[in-house]
Image (tube, rainbow, N blue to C red):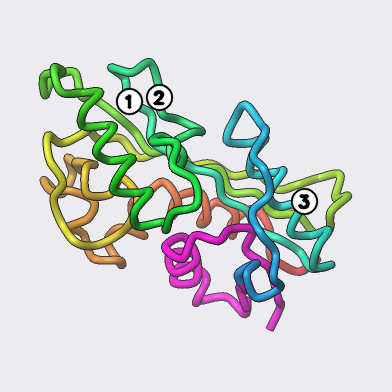
Amino acid sequence: MQKIVLASGNAGKLIELQQILAQKEISLLPQAEFAIGDVEETGLSFVENALIKARHACLETGLPAIADDSGIEVDALNGEPGIYSARYAKLNGVSREVADKANNQKLLWELEQVTEADRGARFQCVIVFLRHNSDPMPVICTGTWEGRVLFSETGENGFGYDSLFYVPSHDCASAQLSAEIKNSISHRGQALRALMRCWNFHP
């Protein structure tokens, strides 16, 4: 099996990507297995940050790398939190679960006076594949998932903002979807399937 490192410490992302890649002869390894910490995301776009993360993982491991940068854009907040979605509440040194809870609470507070009609939002995802750290032709694929922000958290599945993201096509929160259904329609699922279509994973 081909070994590819996932340039992320997010366990939720690892599970989702492994499930989608299960059909391929790919062993997706989290960067934590190589004792690699997160690199500072200094980019000003999802694309820039995904490239930064992928290059860092390639450089540290000598393996090809996949990096995902994603977040939620809220219309009433002019697209925020966007690339800062995972850092929205500005908590450092806490678990992913604690950070997710704080981010959700901040988003609810920011939208407290916003009506349902104006709570439109979307998840954006950029997935980058690099064969090596100096790869001059990175493969970049994107996915967008439209919905809106709920007034309270609902559901137990998923991670991040899933419990606040209403999915019109299924009349429920993302956190109420099974993993199979979510992967079939989500921003990350769209981006990864596009990646598999445009590159055959054999460098």
Q: Residue at x 21, y 42 (%)?
A: 164
Relative image position of residue 20 (x, y in whole percent): 46, 67
Task: For label 2, count other residues whose C-alpha is less than 10 Å away and answer few (under 14), some (14-19) or many (20+).
Answer: some
Question: Is residue 41 in the magenta section?
Answer: no
What's under tag 1, amino acid-wise?
Answer: Val
Q: Are marks 1 and 2 in contact (CB under 8 Å)?
A: yes
User: Residue 94 appears in which quarter of the rendering?
Assistant: bottom left
Along the viewing direction, whichever of 139 and 35 lies nearer the viewer: 35
Mark closest to the chain's N terminus, 1 or 2: 1
In the displayed image of the protein, which residue is found farthest to the bottom?
A: 1
Q: Which residue is mark 1?
A: 74
Q: Judge the density around disc 3: few (<14), some (14-19), many (≥20) Cα neighbours within 10 Å.
A: many
Mark 3 secondary-structure assignment: helix
Query: Magenta region: which residues?
Result: 1-29
Identify the element where label 2 is drawn. loop
Residue 195 or residue 54, whichever sits in front? 54
Residue that label 2 marks: 80
Pick the residue in front: 17 or 105.
105
Residue at image x 28%, y 33%?
106
Amino acid under disc 3: Arg
- Relative placement, left or right, of 182 versus 168 is right
Mark found first going from the N terminus, 3 or 1: 3
Q: Is residue 72 above or below residue 116?
A: below
Q: Is residue 6 magenta?
A: yes
Q: Amino acid at mark 2?
A: Glu
| Residue bearing the label numbered 3 | 55
Residue in the image at 42% along x and 58% along y: 95
The one of 165 and 19 positioned closer to us in this rendering = 165
